[in-house]
Image (spheres, rainbow, N blue to C red):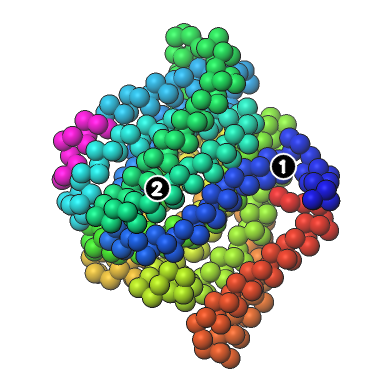
């Protein structure tokens, strides 16, 4: 343990980018690992239909959450003075409570028509809890960016662990004790976890920085920052709304064209694939935002952006390649035979989610460079194209074809998005494509190993174990590279 501590202190000094990423990743890794571990239990307590209804609830929440603070929360990191940041924090909180009232009215009048439109009438009674979920999510987003500005990453890591633990325990308990709750157990567990963890984060901020925030905040100050950062609600809110909607669209339109079971297969596949990517990607995005803001001021944003793109691709490409190859067998072995189709969906979603993982930190550059208008245009193109792909697949009446068309279209668009962000930062597209080509070459041996095992054994369990083994080899190679170069991220 002493050697490990010494290594961390030498390689990851306090306050460094890598140390902050590791701090966030520690909490996120535990949280995501816990949710992956409980997933086989949940898939045996809840049916694909239950997961489908839960996915529809989360999709509606995710779209509304984007505008819960009108995107002013993103601006909290940007001001040089803490006074402006504190006024932005309070402005975000006030808007969030206003959105709570608006959402309550919408639910009161439109919950049943919306549930019927999505092909899940059983969702209607649970939509009453949507305003509460929106409040917890919106407040967390505001507190999250304030903590990021203050570089309180340990605080955020603890919050993530708490939410995951409470959510998982509540969902398992509800499914085991009250099976009649069906999807309500999943929805209720998510709400309780959100509220508890966000409440604790609010208490910590009030305890540590409450006096400072109250001293800075004035009505005049709120009006000033509201006007100064008006581009966020005008452009970034629509951009974020379209971006999130394009991610949530599959669940919503699969529910409209097909059945809740199809939505459930998609939801589980997306959840299992996105979780590991989120462990690293979300943590890096959290720390990269303020660092990119500093790099812009110092004039080395292009170098920082290219390095980030190269490292994110190096981290994500091989694991995604392995999952793409073994996904159907992996899902059948871990979650049960009835979930094999979810693995088929994952094959077509994997490349898209790889570039979502890479773009998650880099997309902050639209805000850093105050190019929200460009981000809005890109997201309009992405949303429109992917909506068309889902409608074409839905009209054809083939769920797998719909997922495949959506995944391929999404991958192409997100590659374009990455390239354009790099261009804005001053990085030539040629360097991005060379980086991608190098990763394809480096990942080929891992893929060939899996193909060889399948040809020799033709056994699903052996195939899955070979995939896991290849992943372990990849981690060993990465660990050796870190030890040799001292570069974590």
Question: Residue 269, how many percent across, how many down?
Answer: 42, 63
Q: Nearer the viewer, mark 1 or mark 2?
A: 2
Indicate which disc, 1 or 2, sits on the residue closer to the N terminus: 1
As helix, strand or loop, the secondary structure at mark 1 comes to: helix
Above or below for 257 versus 57: below
What residue would you read off at disc 1?
19
One can see residue 440 in this view: no
Q: What residue sits 55% from the left and 9% below the top?
A: 215
Horizontally, residue 436 falls left or right of residue 380, namely right
Question: Is-magenta flag for residue 107?
Answer: yes
Viewer-proximal residue among 4 and 319: 4
Question: Is-magenta flag for residue 105?
Answer: yes
Quadrant in which residue 483 is drawn: bottom right
User: What count of labels does the image hold?
Assistant: 2
Q: Which mark is residue 170?
A: 2
Above or below for 26 versus 352: above
Horizontally, residue 450 falls left or right of residue 133, namely right
Residue bounds of the magenta highlight: 103-114
């Amino acid at each position: 343990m002493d050697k490990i501590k010494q290594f961390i202190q030498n390689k990851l000094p306090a306050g460094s980018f890598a140390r902050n990423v590791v701090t966030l990743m520690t909490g996120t890794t535990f949280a995501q690992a816990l949710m992956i571990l409980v997933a086989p239990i949940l898939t045996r307590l809840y049916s694909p239909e239950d997961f489908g209804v839960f996915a529809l609830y989360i999709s509606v929440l995710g779209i509304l959450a984007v505008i819960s603070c009108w995107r002013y929360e993103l601006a909290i990191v940007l001001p040089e003075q803490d006074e402006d940041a504190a006024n932005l924090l309070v402005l975000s909180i006030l808007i969030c409570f206003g959105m709570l009232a608006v959402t309550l009215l919408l639910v009161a009048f439109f919950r049943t028509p919306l549930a019927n439109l999505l092909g899940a009438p059983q969702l209607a009674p649970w939509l009453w809890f949507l305003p509460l979920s929106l409040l917890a999510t919106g407040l967390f987003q505001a507190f999250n960016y304030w903590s990021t500005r203050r570089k309180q990453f340990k605080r955020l890591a603890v919050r993530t662990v708490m939410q995951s633990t409470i959510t998982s325990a509540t969902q398992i308990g509800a499914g085991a004790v009250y099976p009649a709750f069906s999807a309500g157990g999943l929805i209720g567990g998510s709400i309780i976890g959100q509220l508890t963890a966000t409440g604790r984060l609010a208490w910590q901020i009030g305890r540590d920085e409450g006096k400072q925030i109250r001293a800075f905040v004035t009505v005049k100050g709120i009006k000033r920052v509201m006007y100064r950062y008006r581009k966020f609600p005008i452009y970034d809110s629509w951009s974020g709304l379209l971006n999130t909607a394009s991610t949530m669209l599959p669940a919503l339109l699969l529910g409209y064209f097909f059945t809740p079971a199809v939505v459930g297969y998609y939801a589980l596949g997306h959840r299992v694939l996105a979780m590991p990517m989120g462990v690293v990607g979300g943590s890096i995005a959290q720390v990269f935002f303020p660092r990119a803001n500093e790099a812009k001021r110092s004039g080395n944003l292009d170098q920082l952006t290219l390095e980030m793109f190269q490292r994110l691709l190096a981290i994500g490409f091989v694991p995604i390649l392995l999952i793409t190859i073994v996904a159907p067998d992996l899902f059948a072995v871990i979650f049960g035979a009835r979930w094999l189709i979810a693995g088929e969906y994952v094959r077509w979603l994997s490349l898209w989610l790889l570039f979502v993982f890479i773009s998650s930190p880099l997309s902050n550059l639209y805000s850093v460079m105050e190019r929200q208008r460009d981000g809005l245009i890109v997201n309009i193109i992405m949303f429109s194209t992917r909506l068309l792909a889902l409608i074409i697949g839905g009209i054809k009446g083939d769920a797998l074809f719909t997922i495949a068309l959506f995944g391929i279209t999404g991958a192409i668009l997100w590659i374009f998005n990455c390239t354009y962000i790099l261009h804005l930062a001053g990085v030539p597209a040629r360097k991005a494509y060379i980086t991608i080509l190098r990763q394809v070459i480096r990942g080929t041996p891992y893929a060939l190993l899996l193909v060889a095992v399948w040809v020799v054994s033709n056994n699903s369990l052996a195939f899955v174990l070979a995939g896991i083994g290849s992943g372990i080899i990849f981690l060993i190679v990465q660990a050796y590279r870190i030890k040799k170069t001292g570069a974590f991220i």
